[in-house]
Image (cartoon, coloured by chain):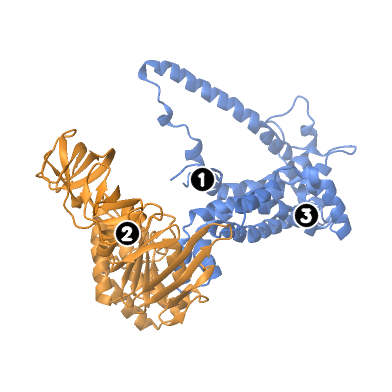
């Protein structure tokens, strides 16, 4: 296993589109590193550049101590799992697994042994003599994972491997991948556009947007203090409420009168936006202590919780997460109260975290 | 995707959407349909039938008035004349058939060998001004061959390709490459690029990955495309007429046309030669008919 260093990566296609503007990543040995972002953010291109399937325009990629810029994919000693599995359709599971080993020219007994080991790890025993089209989507993805395993590569690259599975299977496979990664101590770079997947899998998450890294951090860091307005709007479901505030009398005050604790050292004259998680707000009876007037626009009953959308200070999209026991009807006059700690505060102009 | 000819053209009971109250009307319509289709079939097939009949009639029956449909003596002399010269040895016609086989075959192979990798490249790589390039390639097929036959003739005369099989092979290949690229690009687009990515990670170069994994999946598409190219080269008349003159080089279409005219025309021989000429293409088209339909309808339906 080995760490991966990506420095000043830039990728521009011959037709002029820039897929990656500037990306720096430092992925540790044995780390499960997630690249998260909307489609077109450059995450897949970055991954393919690490794999050697795309040649970066400028920038360096190191795997372990080796500068791999000019190495073809095969010589980088990495394995990749694709969204569409990419199992060879004319080969049985057994031969699909053995294929990369035979390409390496390993002796037969060792190929046999390694295939069996990978099959045991991914519980593929009964599927070994079937062809890909006789397997379900989940089974195909397990075979694809096993195919990556047999190589004993220095790093695993995963390109949205669970996107094509249905929701239930996806949760199972997520657990399986996390477990496998921990057991093998494997370096894994995992690309996804699904924030739940990113949060539940990653040791660290890199959020990409428009070919740049917006933030790198542990799932909790990313959740608690998104580094930019983009991250704030991207992570969390429902996402953070982004409320325009001004500094007055040592407090942050919104247009509707909601008062928040300010982080220290804020300049007065800036136009600011406070990021407030839905769970840091509370819907109360009207006139409750420290509450400001608001009106319920709609309520989403999710069973284990209710998401209230309230009208406050001229905005009709403030979302509040409440336990299912607290019930207000739509259109009811209510109070809105901040219960969380110091919110993340962003500069409107630079869209970056200021405190 | 793989639709057989029968499925594609059959009307079948599924078409009967009309409500019960209008059944009678719909039955009347289907009778009309059958009648019209029968008339159409007769009009379309009669010349073919007449060609076959003429090819097995003796010459005096060919000119008989009123025409004899059934009561004539069957002879295979005309077919013998197609291949064997009256004075013994090979006939000029058989040489022209052989030329057609060589010219159509080699030009099709050439167009396929050039066009398939090009289609793959256009499908897989980000190429500068890709759409413009593809449009330019297609645009060479916009004009009818007659338009360019004079300039081609003059150029060929300069380089000594007049009355030369190589000349015909080159011009047919040039006409078939754009078609091959466009049709094959559709087929390549259908094969996920991930197979090649995976193979490259497994230790193959890009070209090896293409040859070992993508190419086998493209075989049906290549077969269909090649048959279209083959039919074009086999039937081509304008270039063959203008660019060849001697019996050794001439292909079948101008050779058969050359039988007509002069003082007398041996219609039996013309008919027999035409039947022999039509057979190979019919056989090929029959063999790959599923893929031909796939090629024509490719991309028409989103799956």
Same chain, marks 1 and 2?
A: no
The orange-coloured chain is labelled A
Badge 1: chain ID: B
Of residue B268 and residue A149, the one placed in the foreground of this image is A149
Give the percent coordinates (x, y) of residue A178: 25, 68
Q: Are marks 1 and 2 in contact (CB under 8 Å)?
A: no
- Residue B233 x/y as whole percent: 71, 50
The residue at which mark 3 appears reads as B168
Indicate the chain on which mark 3 is placed.
B
Tag 2 residue: A162
Q: Is residue A213 above or below residue A72?
A: above
In whole angstroms, how far apart are the C-alphas of marks 1 and 3?
33 Å
Callout 1: helix, strand or loop?
Answer: loop
Residue under the point 69% across and 29% down: B69
Return the residue nearer the eye: A134 or A74.
Answer: A74
Chain B shown in which color?
Answer: blue
Residue where numbered disc 1 is placed: B299
Quadrant occupied by the N terminus of chain A: bottom left
Q: For the point 82% across and 55% down, which residue is it?
A: B249
């Amino acid at each position: 296993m080995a760490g991966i260093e990506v420095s000043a990566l830039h990728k521009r296609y011959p037709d002029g589109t820039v897929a990656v503007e500037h990306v720096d990543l430092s992925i540790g040995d044995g780390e499960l590193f997630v690249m998260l972002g909307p489609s077109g953010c450059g995450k897949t291109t970055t991954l393919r550049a690490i794999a050697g399937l795309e040649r970066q325009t400028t920038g360096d990629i190191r795997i372990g101590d080796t500068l791999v810029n000019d190495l073809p994919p095969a010589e980088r000693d990495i394995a990749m799992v694709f969204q569409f599995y990419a199992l060879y359709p004319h080969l049985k599971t057994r031969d699909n697994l053995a294929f990369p080993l035979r390409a390496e020219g390993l002796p037969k007994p060792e190929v046999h042994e390694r295939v069996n080991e990978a099959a045991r790890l991914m519980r593929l025993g009964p599927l070994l003599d079937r062809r890909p089209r006789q397997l379900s989507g989940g089974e195909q993805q397990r075979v694809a994972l096993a195919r990556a395993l047999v190589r004993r590569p220095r790093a695993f690259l995963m390109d949205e491997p669970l996107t094509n599975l249905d929701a239930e299977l996806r949760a199972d496979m997520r657990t399986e991948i996390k477990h496998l990664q921990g057991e093998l101590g494997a370096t894994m770079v995992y690309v996804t556009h699904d924030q739940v997947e990113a949060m539940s899998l990653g040791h660290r998450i890199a959020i990409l947007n428009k070919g740049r890294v917006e933030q790198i951090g542990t799932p909790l860091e990313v959740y608690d203090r998104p580094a930019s307005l983009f991250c704030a709007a991207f992570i969390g479901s429902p996402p953070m409420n982004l409320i325009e505030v001004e500094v007055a009398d040592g407090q942050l005050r919104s247009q509707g009168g909601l008062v928040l604790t300010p982080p220290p050292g804020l300049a007065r004259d800036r136009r600011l936006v406070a990021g407030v998680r839905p769970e840091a707000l509370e819907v109360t009876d009207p006139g409750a202590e420290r509450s400001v007037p608001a009106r319920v626009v709609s309520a989403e009953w999710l069973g284990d919780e209710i998401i209230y959308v309230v009208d406050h200070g001229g905005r009709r999209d403030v979302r509040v997460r409440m336990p299912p026991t607290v019930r207000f009807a739509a259109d009811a006059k209510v109070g809105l109260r901040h219960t969380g700690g110091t919110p993340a505060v962003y500069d409107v102009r630079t869209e970056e975290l200021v405190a | 995707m793989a639709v057989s000819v029968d499925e594609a053209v059959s009307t079948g009971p599924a078409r009967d959407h009309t409500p019960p109250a209008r059944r009678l009307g719909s039955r009347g319509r289907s009778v009309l349909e059958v009648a019209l289709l029968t008339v159409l079939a007769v009009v379309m097939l009669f010349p073919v039938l007449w060609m076959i009949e003429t090819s097995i009639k003796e010459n005096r029956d060919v000119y008989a008035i009123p025409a004899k449909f059934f009561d004539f003596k069957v002879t295979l002399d005309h077919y013998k004349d197609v291949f064997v010269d009256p004075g013994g040895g090979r006939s000029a016609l058989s040489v022209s058939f052989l030329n057609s086989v060589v010219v159509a075959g080699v030009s099709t192979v050439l167009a396929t060998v050039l066009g398939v990798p090009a289609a793959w490249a256009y499908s897989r790589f980000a190429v500068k001004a890709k759409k413009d390039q593809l449009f330019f390639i297609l645009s060479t097929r916009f004009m009818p061959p007659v338009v360019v036959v004079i300039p081609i003739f003059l150029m060929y005369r300069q380089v000594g390709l007049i009355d030369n099989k190589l000349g015909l092979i080159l011009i047919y290949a040039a006409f078939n490459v754009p078609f091959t690229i466009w049709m094959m690009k559709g087929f390549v687009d259908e094969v996920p690029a991930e197979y090649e990515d995976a193979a490259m990670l497994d230790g193959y170069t890009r070209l090896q990955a293409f040859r070992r994994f993508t190419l086998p999946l493209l075989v049906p598409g290549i077969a269909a495309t090649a048959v279209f190219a083959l039919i074009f080269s086999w039937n081509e008349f304008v270039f063959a007429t203008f660019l060849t003159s001697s019996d050794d080089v001439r292909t079948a279409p101008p050779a058969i046309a050359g039988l007509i005219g002069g003082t007398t025309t041996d219609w039996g021989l013309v008919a027999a030669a035409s039947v022999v000429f039509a057979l190979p293409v019919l056989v090929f088209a029959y063999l790959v008919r599923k893929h031909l339909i796939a090629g024509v309808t490719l991309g028409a339906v989103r799956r």
